[in-house]
Amino acid sequence: MSGVNVTRTSNLEFNTPFIVTHQQAEIIRALRRRGVISRTDIARMTGWSRAKITTEVSVLIDKGFLKEVGDGTSEGGRRPRLLNINNELGYVIGVDIGATSIDMALADVCGRVMQRQSVPADVRNSPEVVLGHCSQMILDMALAQGTSPEKIYAIGVGVPGPVEFARGTLVAPPLMPEWENFPIRQFFRTTFPSAIIVVDNDVNIMAIGELRAGQGVGLDDFIYVKIGTGIGAGIVSNGKIHRGANGCAGDIGHICVDKQGTMCRCGNIGCLEAMAAGPAIAERAMVAARTGESPILARRLETNGSFLRPEDVGAAFREGDRVACEIIQSSGRMIGEVLAGLVSFFNPSHIFVGGGVTNLGNQLLSSIRQTVLQRSLPLATRHLIIDYSNMGTEAGVTGAIFLTFDYLFYVSD
Amino acid sequence: MSGVNVTRTSNLEFNTPFIVTHQQAEIIRALRRRGVISRTDIARMTGWSRAKITTEVSVLIDKGFLKEVGDGTSEGGRRPRLLNINNELGYVIGVDIGATSIDMALADVCGRVMQRQSVPADVRNSPEVVLGHCSQMILDMALAQGTSPEKIYAIGVGVPGPVEFARGTLVAPPLMPEWENFPIRQFFRTTFPSAIIVVDNDVNIMAIGELRAGQGVGLDDFIYVKIGTGIGAGIVSNGKIHRGANGCAGDIGHICVDKQGTMCRCGNIGCLEAMAAGPAIAERAMVAARTGESPILARRLETNGSFLRPEDVGAAFREGDRVACEIIQSSGRMIGEVLAGLVSFFNPSHIFVGGGVTNLGNQLLSSIRQTVLQRSLPLATRHLIIDYSNMGTEAGVTGAIFLTFDYLFYVSD
């Protein structure tokens, strides 16, 4: 597991203690890209002289940023010493704040996850409450690790709303209006003074998780689609996350799929989210249960009490319920229609689908695929792969950890 | 006018005679980014020692790649000598092959355009005929410049179809099936042996023209939309052109706008192109003329003989024709609906509209804007600018020239 970039400029106002020169940054970048490497590998990648590499690597080892981690394979002659980032340098936290939960992981600075935590939470609470809870969880993890808060050097945070990335704040977040402009970075810094804090949209960190440690490793152009209570996308273009001009790229839940459709909470008619996300699926199932159109769903409604969830529709489908099948297919078709347009526009090699609704099973995926194939041009779908993400909730926290690696070492010379 | 990148790897099989080291490439990259710079500027940008910069610059001057072009402003002490890429090194050609025309320009290696040419052409002819015509035009330009074909060091070519960029060939081009897999690069190389040849989609080179020398300079995320006989988009993400996995990104003409619409030549129903591009506008005007719904259009039809073009609709609108106005608005609304979805997905800061249909005037732009504002989320449209490109046919040839600058100097060390 390894990141790729090292920051050059400080428009993100980071105050990492890990200061390196341009040349040293290039070595760290190579390490992030390749994992463990030898001095000979560095020579090949940079074109620098042996003497220069020896000097720069020594400085990095003296600073405690790098360490030797064993011997590589000989290419004739002495076996080369292998280098990696010093995993004992300290810790990095990945936080994925969802609408109803907080997922968190603690990793070393090489990206090896050492602890995980998941708790229910309600993002409609004030940022002080939710982030205070996060801080406590991080402190607990540090304690369990036998380390102090000062050894937490980075916190990557995913939040379910549009983020102005350079400032690390939410902008007009529909789910959590109280969070608008809240200084998340400063909040964490009071408890974790050594940490750089990087804030991004929740679907972006999932896409980063796929890009750096999942099925997206090595891919240049893909889309990660999260389907749950809402619908959003994380976009990777030329191997980099595309956040857009205002940090709200990927907000595909409000693309219109039916001009005669139902009203969305955004005020428009027939938005994808209002028509095809979890709540719409559950709502349609409730109607089918109440009207007696589906006896299987009716029975589930009775068992649950007064509600149905998307997973009930999935279960009914597996029991052979025709109505549940139609509900899933209809949702998949609408999602597929929007994705077909995005495939024509963006020409991704892969679309990874994640989020809560993915437990509806293969019928959803199959309807999405059929619609995309039918509606996009052959060239764009010739090699297109549409599949469920297999990272589950890991995608978000992993992405949040890797996101910070781009900023952990700061270039100044 | 200046490019930004210098190629590092040769997956494009370029054989430029301009070989540089990594360090020299960094100097050239700085020059492309900034235009004219001093040795002190280079020191600031690279962090290298004075001695190293003196050495590397001397090598580049000795090779004839750079030259001193005068004195800069003193910051106390001697006035610094300014450097630029040696404009006498040779020439670069930009070619924009359209469905019905060839636009071409010859520039020096700094990007200063010295000659232009435009001729009618028919891209449905064989590639040998069309490209043979191009070669002849380039030879004529070289002759007029008093130089030999060997001094043409780069040819950037835009073609109206999906391009597999790494190979420089068209893939399943609907307008020009005969061109599929035709080796454009090899064709030009027989006549211009010193030239690297870079082939890209026509709308991509327009977007590159805007990015490097138009309203797009300094922008990270924008979309260039060409509306003519077809409709296509060029996409810039994180300051770089986004070509997609198969080189067909931006193919927005086949996104569905009306499930009950007319059949498109691609076989699907209600594609944007079939419903809103130039031919659809002309077709609707012909109906209004023949049925007598618009006397103004009927008169124009009579004057023209047996056809109406989009520009006739623009002229009728300016004469106050209500039907012409409705036709333009309807087209603008459909284009706006597709762009609204792309704005939600991509969150561009700007959309530049170019191509033949732009001479329909502000009514088209106004309908597009209204629809986008109505259908996209407020955050994505808060600062969004939708405007006509003001580069006209320059965008394509300029972009084709700048495209080659990324590959003109080849890094090997």
Image (cartoon, coloured by chain):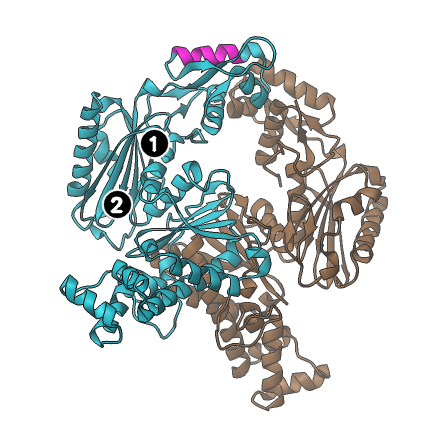
Chain colours: A brown, B cyan
When the figure is inspected, residue A330 is found, relative to residue B244, above or below; the finding is below
**Magenta span of residues:** B53-62
State whether residue B265 appears in this view: no
User: Which of the labelled discs sits on residue B13, or is there none?
Assistant: 1
User: Which of the labelled discs sits on residue B181, or is there none?
Assistant: 2
The picture places residue A267, in percent across and down from the top left corner, at: 59, 70
**Three-letter residue code for mark 2:** Asn
> How far separated are the C-alphas under marks 2 and 1?
16 Å
Judging from the image, mark 1 belongs to the subunit labelled: B
Label 1, secondary structure: give it. Answer: loop
State whether residue B339 appears in this view: yes
**The C terminus of chain A is located in which quarter?**
top right
Neighbor class of circle 2 (other Cα within 10 Å; few <14, some 14-19, many 20+) is some
Are the numbered discs 2 and 1 placed on the same chain, yes or no? yes
Q: Earlier in the sequence, mark 2 or mark 1?
A: 1
Q: Residue at x 82, y 52 (%)?
A: A137
Q: Is residue B60 magenta?
A: yes
User: Which of the labelled discs sits on residue A115, or is there none?
Assistant: none
Q: Nearer the viewer, residue A235 or A388?
A: A235
**The N terminus of chain A is located in which quarter?**
top right
The picture places residue A285, in percent across and down from the top left corner, at: 60, 81
The picture places residue A187, in percent across and down from the top left corner, at: 80, 47
When the figure is inspected, residue A251 is found, relative to residue B56, above or below; the finding is below
Judging from the image, mark 2 belongs to the subunit labelled: B
Q: Residue at x 75, y 30 (%)?
A: A17
Quarter of the rendering containing residue A212 = top right
Q: Is residue A92 magenta?
A: no
The picture places residue A250, in percent across and down from the top left corner, at: 55, 56
Judged from this view, the residue extending furthest toward the front is B319
Residue A53 appears left or right of B150: right
